[in-house]
Image (cartoon, coloured by chain):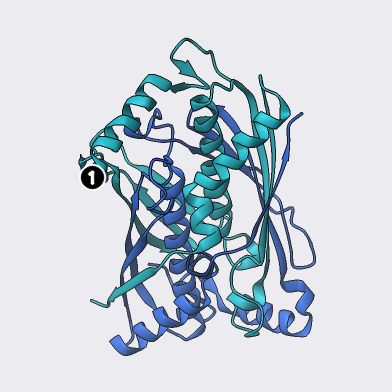
Chain colours: A blue, B cyan
Amino acid sequence: MSIDTATIRNGVNTEQMYGTLDLIKDQPALAQFQFRVSNRWIDGAHNRSTIQGFYGAGAEDTSRAEAYTLDAGEPTVLLGEDTGPNPVEFLLHSLAACLTTSIVYVAAARNVRLTAVESVLTGDLDARGAFGIDPEPRNGFEHIDVAFRVTGDAPEEKLREVVERARRRSAVYDIVTNGVPVAMHVATA
Amino acid sequence: MSIDTATIRNGVNTEQMYGTLDLIKDQPALAQFQFRVSNRWIDGAHNRSTIQGFYGAGAEDTSRAEAYTLDAGEPTVLLGEDTGPNPVEFLLHSLAACLTTSIVYVAAARNVRLTAVESVLTGDLDARGAFGIDPEPRNGFEHIDVAFRVTGDAPEEKLREVVERARRRSAVYDIVTNGVPVAMHVATA
């Protein structure tokens, strides 16, 4: 929950938001973004990603003074040493974060002041797929369940509209429900 | 790169690995896993996930003494205050981490000692989709490019086989390329 002013709503600068939308409408090329992650294996199930630069708004972004690092791992039962959340947990976090920010941005654009946005996500999978034991179960989640609690200064119907609009605009929801083509290149030297 | 012994290869305990595979073959119910993430909005594009327990191997896991916390954000140009990687960057990390661990596990199972696994992932998107400016571009990545460098004590052909097998077994690669059904529930009080 955040302090609101005439232009800051839900912690989002709505003047900047409207300005950004107008700019992109005028110059669609500014909407082209490329995000990047570099990853390096450390040991066993432990690997680390470095995240800093990206291309967007017509230029290479240099606003991040330092890189983010993310450590992944697996728990003991999945042959790791618990050096970080595992890859599918990061995927659930990615989906939770994207839906939440979409809800906050849509609410800001529609004059809805939010007081809380909380979610619990669960993903079920049958590890026989990823372990290659049985061709029948798929490797990834069979399904994902997302439970949101959203409160704010608006009638229930309006809050539900905000969530529904956010779902239809979320980048990660689109990726996870519809899939994306992935090209893989391999060098061995 | 890790120290290898008779049973530890690429940092993976292969005896434990073969034992786990045999156990799951005998008792397929042990392969059922449920992973969970709880997320809470903090302010603007800043939200935080908490990750600890999961169900797997026939029981609720209690091996993690503390929860992991992950902070998400957006850079200034996307109306945030750069409080963490953004949701689509977390998704690229999830994919990088899963493919990398799959490569390491497959190599361990096939007696291939790896010396390096590095990757760079890029994802391109047109923000007009997620901003709801134009119905034409999709919200999420249009495509993802993954460039791996994998080295180890094996001929090039064998290393390429390991990567290809890992791609076909990766949980997140499956999710990201094929999509997963997502059910959303909303409470407003």
| Residue plotted at (43% across, 37% down) | A84
| Quadrant of the frame with the C terminus of chain B | bottom left
| Residue plotted at (49% across, 64% down) | B179
| Percent x, y of residue B104 | 54, 31
Q: Amino acid at mark 1?
A: Ala
Q: Is residue B139 visible?
A: yes
SS of the residue under disc 1: helix
Give the vertical position of B67 relative to A64 (above or below): above
Chain letter for mark 1: B
| Percent x, y of residue B116 | 65, 27
Residue under label 1, please give it.
B29
Q: Is residue A4 visible?
A: no
Q: Which residue lies most toward the top here?
A: B5
Image check: B146 left or right of A169?
A: right
Camera-side residue of B152 and B36? B152
Image check: A148 left or right of B140?
A: left
| Percent x, y of residue A79 | 39, 30
| Percent x, y of residue B57 | 25, 39
